[in-house]
Each structure stands twice: as C-alpha cells, then as structure tokens.
Amino acid sequence: MLQSQLFGKTRKEAPADEVAKNAKLLIRAGYIDKLQSGVYTYLPLGFRVLKKIETIIREEMNAAGGQELLMPALHPKDNWQTTGRWDTMDDLYKVMDSSGRENALGPTHEEIVVPLAKQFISSYKDLPLSVYQIQNKFRMELRAKSGILRGREFIMKDLYSFHRDEADLARYYEIMKGVYKRVFERAGIGEVTHLTFASGGSFSKYSHEFQTVTPAGEDIIHVCTKCGVAINKEVVADQKGCPECGNEDLREEKAIEVGNIFELKTKYSAPFELTYKDEAGNDQPVIMGCYGIGLGRLLGTVVEVLGDEKGIVWPEAISPFQVHLIDLSGKNDAVKDEAKTLYETLEGAGVEVLFDDRDLRAGEKFADADLLGIGLRAVVSEKSLAAGGVELKRRTETEGKVVSKEEFLKMFAK
C-alpha cells in the first residue's frame, strides 16, 4: 500500500472532546474517525487491525467447535417480551416503523438464537452445539466517553452453547476459559489479562470476565499474587481470598473488561420452551452458556496498554502491516528507484507492506511511523545503501541496524 494514497491521514492533535488515550491515538494516526459520541468509522488502517483480531477470534472459536453464522440486528419486540427484557433492559434501543411495528436494535442475541436453535434441536443427538457470530451491536450507552472502549454501536463476537445437562455445560465452559486465554495472548495482552470472578446474577453464583490491567480501566479488580486469578470488586465482599487457590494476598488494580463468559443454564431456553428428548423419549430442558468478546474494545485496550508517548505500538499478530517501508531518497533518483524496487519485491512476495512514498522530511516520516505503530520500520536512504542495505528498527527499539537487502527479504520467507 502506498502511503501517499492511503485513505485517512495523520493529525498533529486529537479532537478536543476526546479524553481517552485509545481514541486520541487512533484518530491522530488515521485508524478511526468519530461520527458522533460512541460511534466510530474504522478507516482502512483500523479496519485491517480489526480484521486481524477477527481472524484470531474466528480461528479459536472454530477450533473449539463453534459454527459461524450471522443473525439479524433488527429484532422483533415479541422475542424480547418473551424473556421480559423489553421492559427491563435500560440500554435497549427501540425503533418503530411507520406501521407502528416495534423492533429492537440487538445488543445481544439470546432472544434470537434460542428460537432459531429450537428449529434444529429436538434430540439428545443434536447436542452439544455451539454457534457464534461477529456482528454490530447497539446499546443506548449514556457514558460513551472512553473512545472505542464504550460505544453505542460496536462489533462483538457472541457465541452460544447448548447442552443436555449442567455437567456438559461445565465441561465446555472450562474449554472456553482456555480459548479466551489464547485469544488475548495472541492479541498481545495475555500477560496483563486476568480471568476474573464476577457476580453470576440470578442464574449462577459466578460468571467470569477477562480483565486487562491498565490505568485507563473503569473496573476495580483484586488480583491473586499467587495464581493470577482475579475477583471483581463487586463480589470481593462475598469471597474470602482467591476463589481459585485460596491465597488471601490480593492486590487491587484498575482494569478493562475485554471478554466475558456466562453459564446461562435455562434462563433463556425456558421462556422459549427449548427442550430435547433424551434416550427414553422424555423432554428435557436445554442448558446454555454464552461467551462474548468486543472486537473494538479489544483493539482499544491494546492501544491503552501498549501505546507510548510517541504513539501506538501494535503486537505483530494484529499490526495492520508487517513492515513500514520508508523512502528517504530526497532528490536522489537512484535511491528512490531502489526503495520502489524493494517495495515491489515485498509486494510480489505477499508481504504486507506500507510504503511511505510521500514527499516529506525524514523527521515527519519517522514521527508518523512511530504514531502508526507498525512493528517493523525499514528505511531506504543514501546512508543505509552506503552502509550495505536497509536500516531496520523495531517500534519498541531506540536504535536501528543496517542489514543487507537479501537478509531483510529472508525475514519474510515462507
């Protein structure tokens, strides 16, 4: 991709009404654009990161037996009345058409997936089953002040599992704990993300959140100094010590919730009379679990945790490009040709490369490279060619080093 043609430009300043680090950096770097409070456009750079995150999540959900589908975002009122949430969910967007028909903009999909599953689950042989989607959600968020961490429209992966009994749900639930751990590790925040015990509400003693420690967090968690499991502040009063290992030495941290999992049991299957016939031909209730990850929230959390005073720092797995190639040829046509040839070679080899071909000073290009946060910077200049090739610098390094063109290309050999 030629940077001169990239849709979305860097800015020296973030909008004055943005206070969150993630929004400031992502807007300045040209990853997102704010349409209104809590609603953002993902520009080409941001969309590339979002798709990398989506790929990680999709791979892990598929490996755990999840089948991907896509459900409507426009939900009939009747479905939400069946569960009672039409009148009790405060942040539910409700819309009415010209005929007076009412619908909800989906904030979650239990009311849709359960009657859908009812069409296909009839026997114990149909269980267990897990389906998921990656889709836009809508919540009438009154506190949309944390950039893409807390939006009114947001992208979420929601997986729903269906089981014949609580034992099978518990088995799958443990599998999903590991799946979520791998997602956050692959996204680059595994070391600071903790499995966190939270209130299970009316259907379970506990649910579980995945909380990432950062000063930008709105939640308070208490992290076990021995095993790393945490407890949400809301349930600390009911729990003496770590619920996982019993250790009573807990440290308080601020954190961002990047995912959650719940044992729903029959909370949503019962209202829709979702049952299956067991081996004896008797009707039994289907037991459920649900598992959510906000993709934009995860993206914003990475920026909050890893970004520095110069800009964004992307982990390799979700970086929009593998390498940021910078042309510092100035008026030297020979160097310009060398940089262009290298770009074309990388493109031909299937390497994801952003080529800064703009007519700007070196300092401006370097500042933009730090702001954009692509993990590897490669500079072609008179100085680098005189020293033997290409100057490479990782985003987290302070000094670069010159390597030969051949050595540089070998880094991307498949």
Image (cartoon, grey):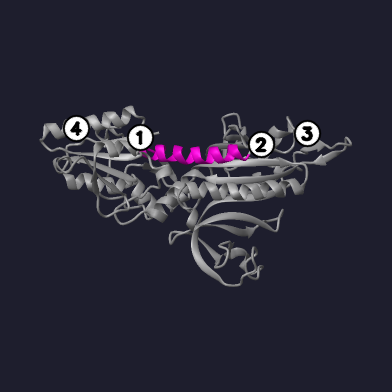
Residue 243 position within the rendered picture, expressed as x and y whole percent measured from the top left: 65, 64
Residue closest to the eye, 101 or 153: 153
For the residues marked 1 and 2, what is the alpha-carbon distance in whole angstroms? 37 Å
| Residue designated by label 4 | 338
Q: Which circle's residue, 4 or 2, is located before the other in the chain?
A: 2
As drawn, the residue found furthest toward the bottom would be 249
- Disc 4 vs disc 2: Cβ atoms closer than 8 Å? no
- SS for dot 3: helix
The segment highlighted magenta reads 41-64
Q: Is residue 69 visible?
A: yes
As drawn, the residue found furthest toward the right would be 280
For the residues marked 3 and 4, what is the alpha-carbon distance in whole angstroms? 63 Å
- Disc 3 vs disc 4: Cβ atoms closer than 8 Å? no
Q: Which mark is residue 352?
A: 1
For the residues marked 4 and 2, what is the alpha-carbon distance in whole angstroms? 55 Å
Q: Nearer the viewer, mark 4 or mark 2?
A: 4
| Residue designated by label 3 | 125
Q: Residue at x 36, y 50 (%)?
A: 313
Q: Residue at x 29, y 34 (%)?
A: 6
For the residues marked 1 and 4, what is the alpha-carbon distance in whole angstroms? 18 Å
Residue closest to the eye, 373 or 233: 373
Displayed quadrant of residue 77:
top right
- SS for dot 1: loop
Query: Does the magenta portion include 51?
Result: yes
For the residues marked 2 and 3, what is the alpha-carbon distance in whole angstroms? 19 Å
Q: Is residue 320 above or below residue 349?
A: below
Q: Which mark is residue 113?
A: 2
Residue closest to the eye, 409 or 371: 409
Is disc 3 surrounded by few (<14), some (14 to 19) or many (20+) residues within 10 Å? few
Q: Which of the image's four quarters has the C terminus?
A: top left
Q: Which mark is residue 240?
A: none
Q: Amino acid at mark 3?
A: Lys
